[in-house]
Amino acid sequence: MTRIRSAVTAVDRRSFLAATGAVGVSAGIGLALGAGGGSGEAAAAPGTAAPSVPSPRTPAASATPTRTDPARTTLDSVAAPRDSAAAFRRLGDGPGWRRVVRETLAAPRPGRAQRRTVLSSFVQLTDLHLVDVQHPVRTEYLRSQQLSGWRPQEALTVPGAVALIEQINALKEGPATGAPLSFAVTTGDNTDNNSRAELDWFLTVMSGGRISPNTGDLQRYEGVQNSDERLFWHPEDSRRDTDKRLGYPRIDGFLDAAIRSVNSPGLRIPWYSTVGNHDGLASGAMADPSGFLAEFAVGAKKLYGIPDAEAKQLLKLLSKGGDPNGAKLIDLLRRSKRAMRSITADPRRAPFGPREYLTAHLDPARAGAGPAGHGYTAANLDNDTLYYTFPMGENVTGISLDTTDRGGHYTGSLNTAQLNWLKRKLAEHRDGYVVIFSHHNSWTMTNTHPDPAHPGEARHNGDEVLALLKRNRNVLAWVNGHSHRNSILPHGSFWEISTASHIDFPQLARVIEITDNGDGTLSLFTTLIESAAPHRTDFEDLSQTGLAALYRELSHNAPGSTTAPAGKSSDRNTELLLSR
């Protein structure tokens, strides 16, 4: 019997985008991304690591080198709908995105391609959101008020991320310069529910090994997709549900395939890690001092549905980050015990704190291609910090920040101790170049509520960080994520480069190549890449590669999915000029 059955009706669209500027509210309360995630010029509103071997100062091959391998980038082709009028849009090979030269901060000079040398060439991955879709603290039931409260593709985040690793390994060299890729760096939200299982999956995806993306019952999926709640896509039955009404197919065997083990080759280049709010807070937004959510996470009960009035009230509160200590969610869970269903308890769903996050990165079994700790060192453990510096190439230093407020809320900020540390590091490297890495971008660093652990210490917002970076001409770029959309902004003397997520369509990562043009200017080339999965899907193919392709197509068809995360052409494949 064929696995494919579909129902076709009109597609609902997300009003939440207009209200918050966010991509959506995830089932873990939130991607809760905050407002102002615009693109292009209009979006302006809104310890040192163990060194790896940096790449040498490499003569650039040319502006458009001859390809020596089959790896594609979005310069070549981009996944695009074959029939944009269909309710469920099947993907295929679409035209690539051209490179745009941006001259706001410096004018391009003739002959620079022949003069330039490469200072650094690397890949940014951001917002992987590896999801334990069976986690009890998730709030999928908010979908009754907002369809983007749950994504049909979420069960396939692990094979999707592995396909991205495969693409980076195949790419090998920078598409603009031909220089070897020296390293990769994540910019946070590596996990989704701040669970130990997800952290294990992330580190294995990045460093290599076998992953079983399943918790609870080892033989059976226990999440919302076989709960009989018609609010969610049930891929293995013929009855109509919310997503089948939007054209989603029936795919027999989907749930067994989604929890099947996946093999990751691991990155073949060194990689560095940056922390995000979903890596440090319950559901990316809440710091529960009571311990209730931690206990509930490992327990044997899960809530699948709540009354619409309750969902409406909770969604309104959480979309504004109005429950930083989780009190309202805890109250709902306490009152809803009779409505819960039994699941298999699992201690691997327990949340991890900063110390566990660091210890896991420092585990020699997780070293992969290195460096040991992936940026973090024993000094971070001793000082309870999640920020560091690392070498990026000749005379270029990376600074990885921790912008999550441990007191809760999905928006970010820096505490005074970290801001002062940043000032010192910028001064220490005044004679070289610096690139800043963080999870939050400048316009979502608005959380200045005190950290309960440090009530007397101020928090500092994005405007303060921008002002500091502008005073230091050694800063070339601030590279970040969080808002799940591509955006590149000029800030007087440096560029802010924000990259879309790998859970929402178009599921991208970004190659960045820094060159000295030998004429008083520098160029930062940015090139977006998709995963190695084919653009076309086959609903009969539930192999690891087939699931990764399906992950992309499901995300393209997620209710309310738009082209906004891709940004404008000036936010995608670019040459960003700087005067130095």
Image (cartoon, rainbow, N blue to C red):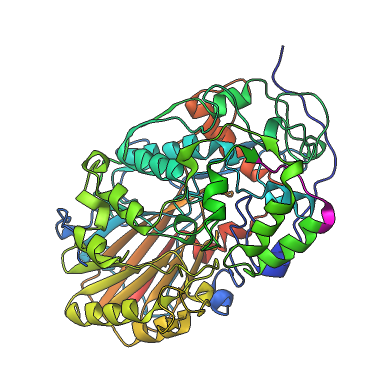
Q: Is residue 515 left or right of residue 26?
A: left
* Residue situated in front as seen by the camera: 543 or 330: 330
Give coordinates of residue 536: x percent, y percent: 58, 32
Q: Can residue 161 be spotted in the picture?
A: yes
Location of the C terminus by quadrant is bottom left
Give coordinates of residue 106: x percent, y percent: 36, 79
* Count of all numbered marks drawn on residues in the image: 0
Write down the region rendered in magenta. 302-309
Q: Is residue 7 left or right of residue 530?
A: right
**Residue at (77, 54) in percent of width and height:** 13
**Residue at (56, 24) in percent of width and height:** 257
Quadrant assignment, res 279: bottom left
Q: Does the magenta-highlighted stretch encompass residue 308?
A: yes
Q: Is residue 61 left or right of residue 187?
A: left
Q: Does the magenta-highlighted stretch encompass residue 27?
A: no
Q: Can residue 371 be spotted in the picture?
A: no
| Residue 427, above or below 223 | below
**Residue at (37, 78) in percent of width and height:** 107
Location of the N terminus by quadrant is top right
* Residue situated in front as seen by the camera: 139 or 372: 139
| Residue 454, above or below 252 | below
* Residue situated in front as seen by the camera: 138 or 533: 138
Quadrant assignment, res 473: bottom left
Give coordinates of residue 430: x percent, y percent: 20, 81
